[in-house]
Image: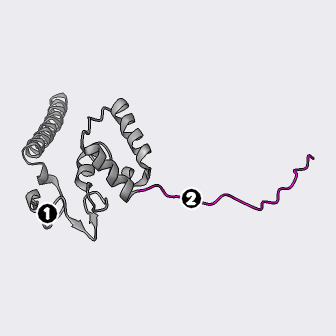
Amino acid sequence: MDKKDNFRKQVRSFYSVLLTSFIMVMLIGILGVTYMINPSAFSFKENGPSSEMVSKNAEDEDWDKIENGIHLRTGLKDADGLMAVVNNCTNCHSAKLVMQNRMNEERWVETIRWMQETQNLWDLGENEKVIVDYLVTNYPPKSKGRREALTNIEWYPLEDK
């Protein structure tokens, strides 16, 4: 009888382990299915105010607005030929590049030729004269560089040790 009781104890303990394992697998399965259906169910963040998307109609904005003599979108000065420069130059690069490269008429024409030969710039036709005149008038070369050349320098010989 002792062997039968011992066997029954082992079967019961095996049965309880098996039942506990089955319940755990079922719970994990239910949690997994719940997470797949609604992942936010396990988010412990409080429901704060949700952000709302606001669309702005691009047609309402004036893209060619000029204030205080400056074209706001590009930063270029307002003068004859501004829109020709905006339409032909800012397609490929920033207007800041145009503003920083201050050149005379000959250099601008040379630069345009270089862009046409190497950068696939289209033929500007009659606009070329208008563009060059605008650039020479509004962004002429500056006569001084960053600093003046050094003068009255007192050099001293270096001694070998």
Give me the disc on residue 146.
Answer: 2
116 vs 152, left or right, is left
Looking at the rendered structure, the kind of residue marked 2 is Arg
The verdict on residue 141 being magenta is: yes
* Rendering coords of residue 34 (x, y %): 8, 46
Question: Observer-nearest residue: 80 or 88?
Answer: 80
Question: Observer-nearest residue: 34 or 159?
Answer: 159
Kindly identify the residue that appears in the image at 24 percent across and 39 percent down.
125
45 vs 142, left or right, is left
* Rendering coords of residue 114 (x, y %): 39, 35
Q: Which residues are magenta?
A: 140-161
The residue labelled by disc 1 is: 51
27 vs 90, left or right, is left
Cα distance, mark 2 to mark 1?
49 Å
Looking at the rendered structure, the kind of residue marked 1 is Ser
Q: Residue furthest left?
A: 37
Colour pattern of the rendering: one colour
Question: Observer-nearest residue: 47 or 72?
Answer: 72
* Rendering coords of residue 65 (x, y %): 19, 64
**Disc 1, SS:** loop
Give me the disc on residue 91.
Answer: none
* Rendering coords of residue 111 (x, y %): 40, 40
